[in-house]
Amino acid sequence: MAAAPKPETLAAFEAAKGFMPVREGLALYAAAAEAGALGLPLLEVGTYCGRSTILLADAAREAGTTAVTVDHHRGSEEQQPGWDHHDPDVVDPEVGRMDTLPAFRRTLFRAGLEDHVIAVVGRSGQVAKVWGTPLGLLFIDGGHTDEHAGGDYEGWAPHVADGGLLVIHDVFPDPVDEWTGQAPYRVYLRALASGAFTEVSVTDSLRVLRRTGPGI
Ligand SMILES: C[S@@+](CC[C@H](N)C(=O)[O-])C[C@H]1O[C@@H](n2cnc3c(N)ncnc32)[C@H](O)[C@@H]1O
């Protein structure tokens, strides 16, 4: 049976602001719990307000490793004012830009998981360039343009350890089903075509792949 988060973790996840449905969250947790056995960090691109981070943090705690989450906290294209996914509550009134860092910190604090997460505030591509540690799990849930999702894959997937997992959110093979574009789907196809990754599971728009070969 797939590993499941503790009831209090699930409750904190459900209470947190964010974009991940419960079914996908449970699949993410199961992947993180499995990958945690490698004893390597579990890294997320796309923190937002910490909803999915809670699950990675809990799995990391159980495995005795750490979750790392990367975000510039200024929001993706579809979260900016005027777009469907904009939330005025996460705008910093002083600078007039989105800032999800305070909400993220409150989420982790309430979940009691602060000690299990390293939050990196920065642009994914810039952080990936200075990163040097193999990853047990990479979760791609950042920008949904080809430039950003493709950049996340190119910058971070090389760090996924042998046997480690690559998890991609918002994979929509059918363009009528999606609201944020098909860049994550194209990343998923690239990962499979690379020969470095093999599909493990599909849960709605969440895909879990395992590194089974060298490269990307
Ligand atoms: C879809 S949200 C993440 C949702 C989150 N995982 C959840 O469960 O609610 C995408 C996040 O990626 C961040 N983002 C987009 N492009 C980025 C980039 N190039 N570097 C860092 N963060 C980025 C945005 O600021 C936004 O918070």
Image: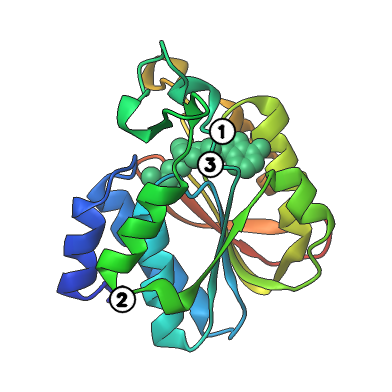
Compute the Cα span from label 3 to label 1: 23 Å
Q: Give the residue pinned by disc 1.
A: 185
* Amino acid type at image mark 1: Tyr
Looking at this view, name the residue that lies furthest to the front: 94
Colour scheme used in the picture? rainbow
Q: Which mark is residue 73?
A: 3
**Type of the residue with mark 2:** Ala
What crowding class fits label 3: few (fewer than 14 Cα within 10 Å), some (14-19), or many (20 or more)?
many
Q: Nearer the viewer, mark 3 or mark 1?
A: 3
Question: Is 45 located above or below residue 58 in the figure?
Answer: above
**Position above or below: 4 against 87:** below
- What residue did someone put label 2 on? 3
Q: Mark 3 falls on what kind of element?
A: loop
The answer to which image quadrant residue 186 occupies is top right
Residue appearing at x 67%, y 48% in the figure: 122
Task: Say which label, 1 or 2, has the lower sequence index.
Answer: 2
Counting from the top left corner in percent of width and height, residue 30 is at: 37, 69
Counting residues from the N terminus, which is met first, the one under dot 2 or under dot 3?
A: 2
Residue 19 percent location from the top left of the image: 34, 39
70 to the left or right of 78:
right
**Residue at 60% across / 43% down in the picture?**
72
Q: Let me know if residue 188 appears in the view.
A: no
